[in-house]
Amino acid sequence: MIIGTGPGGEGTAMNLAKSNKKVAVIERQQAVGGGCVHWGTIPSKALRHSVSRYIEYKANPLFNITERPGRITFADILNHTSSVISKQSSLRSSFYERNRIDLFQGEASFVDKTTVNVQHQDGSFERLSAPIIVIATGSRPYRPKEIDFNHPRVFDSDTILSLKDDPQRILIYGAGVIGCEYASIFKGLGMKVDLVNTRDRLLAFMDDEISDALSYHFWNSGIFIRHNEEFDHVETKDDGIIMHMKSGKRVKADCLLFANGRTGNTDTLNLQAIGLKADGRGQLKVNESYQTEVDNVYAVGDVIGYPSLASAAFDQGRICADAIVQGECKEKLIIDIPAGIYTIPEMSSVGKTEQQLTAAKIPYEVGRAQFKHLARAQIAGTDVGSLKILFHSETKEVLGVHCFGERASEIVHIGQAIMEQKGSGNNVEYFVNTTFNYPTMAEAYRVAALNGLNRLV
């Protein structure tokens, strides 16, 4: 029995069903897919795609010969997003039907370690039992008690999809992945954006040069970034909000998007009934087999914390199912999980950063390719950005790939594939000795490899 139908729950359920296990899933929403499909990954990326195409249209000289359309609104692009959400949910629902997985809709809570109560939307209850239970309930935006999220001008990353009016100025608190992505979206729609960062730089886990490129691009586009700031309180009014900072500053905006952290969805599971306790962020601790401290209860996805990625959650579910079926966990989540950040332009990376390699005293060289020199980027008008390959100075092993620019989240997988090769298969010279389609963005690897190899002493 699996609680939750997001990426982690789906990955677990499908693999167990393929292993001829009788599987039931419990979903509290009316449609399957979890936060990933309905409020998180899919909506934000669909919004981003629409805005990105709109920006390209406005910048393309080909369309200057005709009268431009009026400014599009957030509500306009939500139409496309709603269509994608519907298609994704319908598709994922068909997976459960095809694999004969029983779907129960309602709120799940533990009775004991093998029994769950399911409260349906009409108020009725149903009791289900299974020898193995997997918690895949995901996460939700963190909501500090000091902020009134019931106010019509205060949103989190879930409720922002219900934004009806088009604000002229939006304040985004939290400059993590979600905050930066939405800053790109709203700026692309022509709004004034204030981005409050509680740290000293944007996305500090990324390679410094890539992070700096995003900071410059934000600054150049007019996004106002405030680093090292924390809110003291938020004043809500009929016509907007005022955020009071601990530093004494005040920032006024038409609305607030609070995007600073997430909380695991464990508070309604009645975990105390099975002797399980979540941490302060609602997250559960698991071993390498995704088994909790209760031997027959497993957990996967955002509810266990890092890396909190939809892509990783699918794999966690698959590996968890194997551990359940085989009684042991032979597979492991890959070490070098690619990060894809869907700002405008995109950012992506896999492997070590320059800062990590320098701190570890690993001798490395850098190969760079600027997109503005690639024929495909010139044709498409997407010449902002670059690709960076980090490789060992002596063995030429590829240690990291970092990319900033359109299609970065796609391009990075070429480098990842080479990094996953063992021994001599992982060598930067591969990119020189292979033949890439021309013109393509992938050609950046050949340019970057030659650039780096020419720098070797």
Image: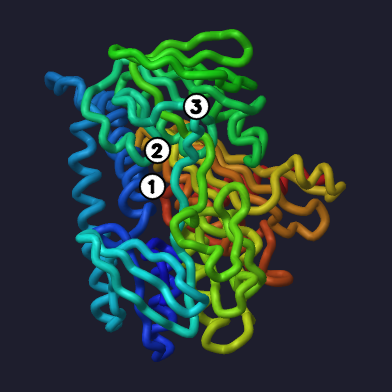
The residue that appears at 48% across and 67% down in the rendered structure is 135
- Image quadrant for the N terminus? bottom left
**Label 2 to label 3: alpha-carbon separation:** 17 Å
Marks 1 and 2 in Cβ contact (< 8 Å): yes
Q: Which residue is mark 1?
A: 40
Q: Residues within 10 Å of mark 1 (few under 14, many from 20)?
A: some
Tell me what residue is drawn at x 49 percent, y 40 percent: 142
CB under 8 Å between discs 1 and 3: no
Q: What secondary structure is marked by label 1?
A: loop
Frontmost residue, 368 versus 341: 341
The disc, 2 or 3, on the residue closer to the chain's N-terminal end is: 3
Amino acid bearing label 1: Gly
Mark 1 vs mark 2, CA separation in Å: 7 Å
Point out which mark residue 146 bears.
3
Give the side of residue 6 with respect to residue 425, left or right: left
Residue 8 is situated, as x and y percent measured from the top left of the image, at 45, 65
115, 454: nearer the viewer: 115
Residue 134 visible in rendering: yes
Q: Which residue occupies the foreground of this view, 14 or 385?
A: 14
Task: Read off the residue under disc 2.
Answer: 157
Lower sequence index among marks 1 and 2: 1
Name the residue located 46 percent from the left edge and 18 percent from the top edge. 234
* Spatial separation of the CA atoms under disc 1 and disc 3: 24 Å
Q: Is residue 70 above or below residue 346?
A: above
